[in-house]
Image (cartoon, grey):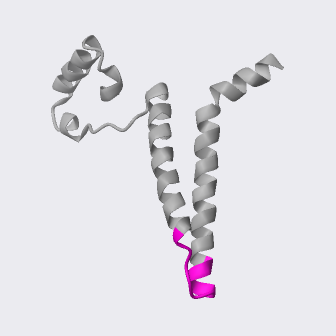
Amino acid sequence: MKKRWFQLIHNFENIITGFLLCTIITLLFIQVIARYVFGSAFSWTEEIARFGFLAMVYISASIGIQRGSHIRINAHILRFPEPIQKIIFLMGISFGLHSIFL
């Protein structure tokens, strides 16, 4: 029982983002059906989907930081020759920025 609670707490952010994604998809599907089949749209579905998307982005950002897989831009680093790329990578590790350059 303790193990199950630990897994629930550990995966809480994943569960919330999955729920938000399913909610957004469902609401937008309802919006499309209402607009094309019935000829009128619900205004509240778009608002809930928008705020759900914002919440999902913020929660997903924290998941990305925990996993060390957040978005990085390394196109400028890849333009340097291989030895300079390694030096930049080592500088990033020494300054604690290794997750940016990985």
Instruction: Determine whether, in the image, residue 37 is placed left or right of residue 63.
Output: right
The quarter of the picture where the N terminus appears is top right
Residue 40, percent from left and from top: 56, 84
Q: Is residue 26 above or below residue 36?
A: above
Q: Is residue 34 above or below residue 59?
A: below
Q: Is residue 23 magenta?
A: no
Relative depth, front residue between 23 and 91: 23
Outermost residue to the top: 94
Q: Nearer the viewer, residue 25 or 64?
A: 25
Give the total of numbered labels.
Answer: 0
**Figure check: 87 above or below 53:** above
What stretch of residues is rendered in magenta? 33-43
Q: Position of residue 72 (x, y in %)?
A: 32, 36
Residue at 50 percent of width and 38 percent of height: 59
Q: Residue at x 61, y 70 (%)?
A: 29
x 71%, y 21%: residue: 6
Q: Residue at x 47, y 58 (%)?
A: 50
Residue at the outermost right position = 1
Q: Is residue 35 magenta?
A: yes
Quarter of the image for residue 14 reads: top right
Describe residue 102's horizontal placement relative to residue 33 as left or right. Answer: left
* Residue 81 % position (x, y): 16, 31
Q: Quadrant of residue 23?
A: bottom right
Q: Is residue 27 left or right of residue 74?
A: right
Identify the residue at the far front of this view: 44
Quarter of the image with the C terminus is: top left
